Amino acid sequence: MHYRRIPALLGAIAVVMALVGAAPAATPSTVTIRIEGSKKTLLLSTSATGEMGSITQGGTPTGKCSGATVAGALDRVTHHNWTGKYYASVPGIFVTSILGEKPAGNDYWALFVNNKSSTKGICDLTLYGEQVLFADSDGSHYPAALTTPQSATAGHPFTVQLVGYNAKGKAKPLAGVSITGGGIPAVKTNAHGAASITDSHHGNLVLRAAPTGYLRTEALVHVAG
């Protein structure tokens, strides 16, 4: 357990360690979860609902972590493919790996809710519709977000916009960043963080951006005829 990462004794420890609290929730939580590994995206934004019962990952005692929380949603969306260790002294759980990826060096699984660092642990978060991001990071980068239409027409341009967030969750447009994906030519965002994209192919187009100083982001657009 790396205590030097903890900026405040208990208030911020959940942000660094994705800590689990003891309060149960009655109804499964529905959130959108995205998982960013250190080198690649491990899971695109996916809607997930929590589980019934308790999460006992990492030796967490039964009843200490309700499945009707973000912890349950993470467990469901990864098909139980995550690990951690429970610390009774906190109490909480240190998330050690997600989808087979274990952070190295000073990195850890940072937790963001609606593009802002979470002040609660995954078992304290009972959310409805919020965006949850787990990122393998050293804590020095904040999220970026790529806004796109859900669908587009093949051969017709559509507009996307890229913003980056600061520690307070405030967004600003990101200019000069390449938007790539699906074999389309890379396009850079303008001064307003916007770019025009045209895809002549049908199907799902995954657009990606990796702005300097921010966590990478991506979005899915369904391109129809």
Image (cartoon, grey):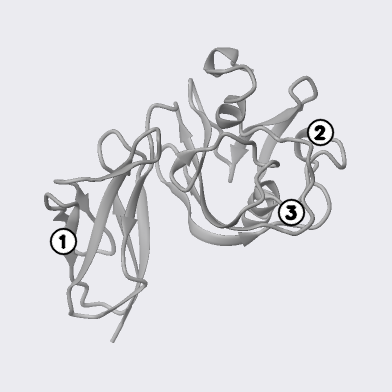
Amino acid on which disc 1 is placed: Pro
Kindly identify which residue carries mark 2. Answer: 59
Instruction: Please give the count of numbered marks on the rendered protein.
Output: 3
Q: Residue furthest bottom?
A: 225
Percent of width and height locating residue 147: 32, 60
State the residue position of label 1: 185
Is residue 174 depicted above or below 33 in this figure? Answer: above
State the image coordinates of residue 42 (x, y, percent, origin top left): 48, 49
Separation of marks 3 and 2 at Cα, in angstroms: 18 Å
Which residue is the site of mark 3?
Answer: 68
Quick check: marks 2 and 1 in contact, CB under 8 Å? no
Q: In this view, does 204 lie above or below 111?
A: below
Q: Which residue type does callout 3 highlight? A: Ala
Image point (48%, 20%), residue name: 106
Q: Quadrant of residue 50?
A: bottom right
Residue 216 spot, x, y in % from top left:
35, 44
